[in-house]
Image: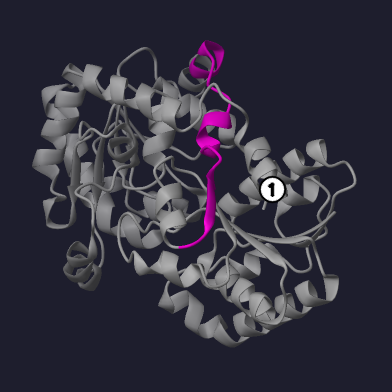
Amino acid sequence: MLVFIIAGEASGDKLGAAVMAGLKALCPDVAFVGVGGANMAEQGLESLFAMEELSVMGLSEVLPKYRHLVKRKNEMVEAVVAAKPDVLLTIDSPDFCKRVAKAVKARTDIKTVHYVAPSVWAWRPKRAQKMAGFIDKVLTLLPFEPPLMQAAGMEAAFVGHPVVAEPEATEADIAAFRARHALGERPLMLVLPGSRMGEVSRLSERFAASTRAVLKAKPETVPVVVMAEAVRGYFEKTKHVWPEGTHFVAPKDATEKRAAFAAADVALAASGTVSLELAAARTPMVIGYDMAWLSRLILPRLMLVDTVTLVNLVSKTRVVPEFIGKACQPAPMAAAVLQALEAPTAQLEAMDITMQRLGRGGEDPGLRAAKAVLSA
């Protein structure tokens, strides 16, 4: 069996490695060709070019590289057609992957599977209908997505979210994290203003002001800002806006990051999949987010849901407070953090429901995804 597989960013590389491992376990003679990163290389993929060439986001990044991306897309199409694989598996990176799949489908009858459904439940539902013209099957991370894909005319399978397959931090991991950063036994407030420069620059001062208000009410609390490596320099230049005694941590690996999440008593976080990582660690949270002024103006008119927090959506509750757009202000976020510290029970129950519905305790998501690919 030959699988042509394409991933264009770090999260897709992890998904790709997991499904490759699953396919190898189920189908020992499977072979792979395509594009991926270090994790997929460990599973035996020799990437046709560096995956990082596809890891661009936003107009400011895409436009200078547009011609090169079109060239790579055309190369991928020709490579798939020439290889004649049993299946083309594209993983996330929709702008690139869907263009490849559409062009391949126009010229061949190769089975096409896309891993990670578009968020049609949140906005732009017609995306699914457009995909149905060239995607045969969708593998979804969220349990309520398959019916939406099926209604658009595609096969779909919920395969579980990768967060449930991550190891849990041990007491020893947590103790080592506290000792490494000299945090003692005081309560920890984790602050996560994002991983991209745009969101970090918009959120940091407001998150810092919220943290200061929390410390005024709970002076024994230790703030810990978790930095992505890409924005470490920004925090080093702007440490003065944060309360005295704030710790800045750039986790050296996934184990340290999980320990930081598990050690925290509460978190103030930017919107995104980080809410699921906090839920996996059973850390109560408050979500805050703001966007560029044009997006702030347009997106609310397109949204089909009343919450953007995945814990709220999957658990079918609204217990995680969120402050989006104009509502992303220090005082109400600080009040919500204090409330989460005082009364975490409802959030903890919703987190447990979320993890169960995402597949915790069940079959490994990579193996489930592999089975879904084989049945495409």
Q: Is residue 81 above or below residue 207?
A: below
Please indicate, yes or no, whether residue 138 appears anywhere in the rendered image: yes
Please indicate, yes or no, whether residue 215 appears anywhere in the rendered image: no
What x and y, as percent, mark residue 35? 72, 63
Question: Does the magenta portion include 160?
Answer: yes
What x and y, as percent, mark residue 153? 48, 62
Residue beneath the point at 19% across and 37% down:
321
Asked which quadrant contains residue 149, the reply is bottom left
What x and y, as percent, mark residue 100? 63, 74
Residue beneath the point at 17% across and 39% down:
210
How is the protein colored in the picture?
one colour
Question: Left of 279 or right of it: where is 55?
Answer: right
- Crowd rating for badge 1 (residues with CA inside 10 Å; few <14, some 14–19, many 20+): few
What x and y, as percent, mark residue 131? 50, 68
Q: Is residue 29 above or below residue 342?
A: below
Question: Left of 272 or right of it: where is 252?
Answer: right
**Quadrant placement of the N terminus:** bottom right
Name the one closer to the observer, 135 or 70. Answer: 135
Name the one closer to the observer, 167 or 226. Answer: 167
From the image, tell me which residue sits under label 1: 375
Numbered disc 1: secondary structure? loop
User: Which amino acid type corresponds to the residue marked 1 in the rendered image?
Assistant: Ser
Residue lying at the far bottom in this picture: please name it.
Answer: 67
Asked which quadrant contains residue 127, the reply is bottom left
| Magenta stretch, residue numbers | 153-174
Residue beneath the point at 70% across and 58% down:
36
